[in-house]
Amino acid sequence: MTERSKIRTIESAIREAVLSLTANLSMKERIEGFLEIFAKVTGNHACAVLRFQDGVLVPVATRGLSPEVMGRQFHPEQHPRFAAILSSRTPVRFPPDDPRPDPYDSLLLNDAGGSLRVHSCIGCSLYNENTLLGVLSADALNPGAFDGLHDDVFQTFAAIATVALRHESFISALERLAKHRELVTSELVNEALQRGGGQLIGDSPALQELKRNIGIVARSDLTVLITGETGVGKEVVARVIHAQSLRSDQPLVYVNCAALPETLAESELFGHVRGAFTGASTDRAGKFELAEGGTLFLDEVGELPLSVQAKLLRALQFGEIQRLGSDKSHRADVRIIAATNRQLAEEVKAGRFRADLYHRLSVYPLHVPPLRERPSDIAPLAGHFLDQARTRLGLDRINLAPATIEVLTAYSWPGNVRELEHVILRAALRASAERGRSLTLQPDDLDIGPEVLRNMDAKGGMPPGPGSISLTRAVDDFQRQLILKTLGECRFNWSETARRLGLDRGNLHRLARRLGLKPLRRTG
């Protein structure tokens, strides 16, 4: 290829990259399309756009990297190459013998056992004037892969990535301003919520639908009933609703209804006056009063005694509460969010839950899908819990082998997200005790190894034989595994994957969305 034709090819790719950011897709899909074009021009095996947020680098989109990367955060002080990139306004190249470890070592897609090592690395900080927005990075397995790439070409792609991040940041800022009446206070509340687990990790169609419904109901004052199995994250959903509401700068008060003794439940919720019962030596405010102006989260509401349900119904109907032992009532400005793992409609039929209270609580019901229905969220969640384990256990590095991700995805997770968190923490603790501070978790490190998978049928998980499952599910499972395998072999190139599988590219994307391998495309 002549120099002139090479320039024309690059110019064409740059135009295509710019136009990709105007497509009618989500921002994540737009940046993924941009990275695919960027990879064609630079010849990299892995690349990523990361946002600089609260002192850490958070992946926005990646290509050629393990899906667990999307659940990670990269602290520059722990990754010297990222620190070097952030300290420069021009592209930074790292020679093959550079002693600083590459942050993506053992995180390349289909890197079985963490044997592949990055040999060519280049990165550029993304600045909007004097504001640091993030990083564009590219890695290749062969030394000298980027020697023929001019800095100005890389900087042009970095400028496009900067515009994309700037646009996303601008839209997010407008949304935050619209959601919060007092920005500074709300930001402090949101940071506290994040530390307490107030985030929904994953991008599966089921989770996207849940997030969409949260966005619809959050800014209203409607009562929300969150349903779902134990461990799916109902409390996290309640925190997210509160964080996105107009009450976000007011308290979110948590009540575990299952832990309330029947004799004290009324006092805990509505308070009492001195002398109301034996031991009531002073007046005491209840949870409703503590939540004034904010949100009251009633977890396991199905466990409330019938006697207390009547008073809760009155509080919901008339917005009035009355302390135990008092003849005075007063208005309560409280938004109610309730959660239960029970089937309240069945509890109503059995006479264990009031029908009128059930209908008052379920003004806007939200169902949190179990983890087995959103397998594409498992890898990012596992990456998030690995980050927590690394910090808590003082590890240098901890990753998941591709085979480990397959085992995690195949398991039915009867304990849902909570069980996944505990499995990851236990595996990290045991593996670090045996193999040191830098490790890659293998399937044998988990509590759900092959011998457990064979017995899943007894625990309600994936059946052991093809005769125990429907034909539709068996076909879906086969298609999902074949697409993932081929996609990895094609270095996450969807066009090449479609060609190898003998499918139209659009049909492959639609099939991948149906199987939960890609997020649903937003319409309307």
Image (cartoon, grey):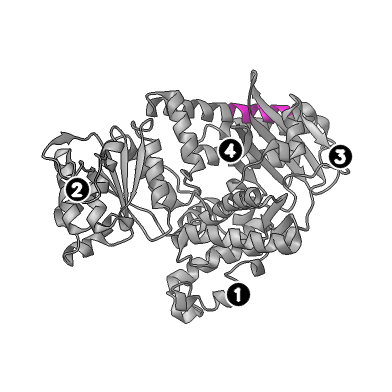
Q: Amino acid at mark 3?
A: Pro
Mark 4–mark 2 CB contact (< 8 Å):
no
Q: CA distance from mark 1 to mark 3?
A: 41 Å
Which is nearer the N-term, disc 3 or disc 4?
4
Which is nearer the N-term, disc 4 or disc 1?
4
Circle nearer the viewer, 4 or 1:
1
Q: Residue at x 60, y 64 (%)?
A: 406
Nearest to the observer: residue 323 or residue 479: 323
Q: CA distance from mark 4 to mark 1?
A: 37 Å
Q: Residue at x 18, y 67 (%)?
A: 350
Q: Amino acid at mark 4?
A: Ile
Which is nearer the N-term, disc 4 or disc 2?
4
| Residue at mark 2 | 312
Q: Return the mark for residue 450.
A: 1
Tell me, yes or no, whether the highlighted magenta stretch contains residue 42: no
Dot 3: what SS?
A: loop
| Residue at mark 4 | 31
Q: Which residues are magenta?
A: 155-164
Q: Amino acid at mark 1?
A: Pro
Confirm whether residue 24 shows in the render: no
Circle nearer the viewer, 1 or 3:
1
Q: Residue at x 47, y 30 (%)?
A: 188
Dot 1: what SS?
A: helix
Q: Residue 107 location, x and y as percent?
A: 70, 52
- Mark 3 crowd level (few <14, some 14–19, many ≥20, 10 Å Cα): few
Nearest to the observer: residue 311 or residue 111: 311
Q: Quadrant of residue 90?
A: top right
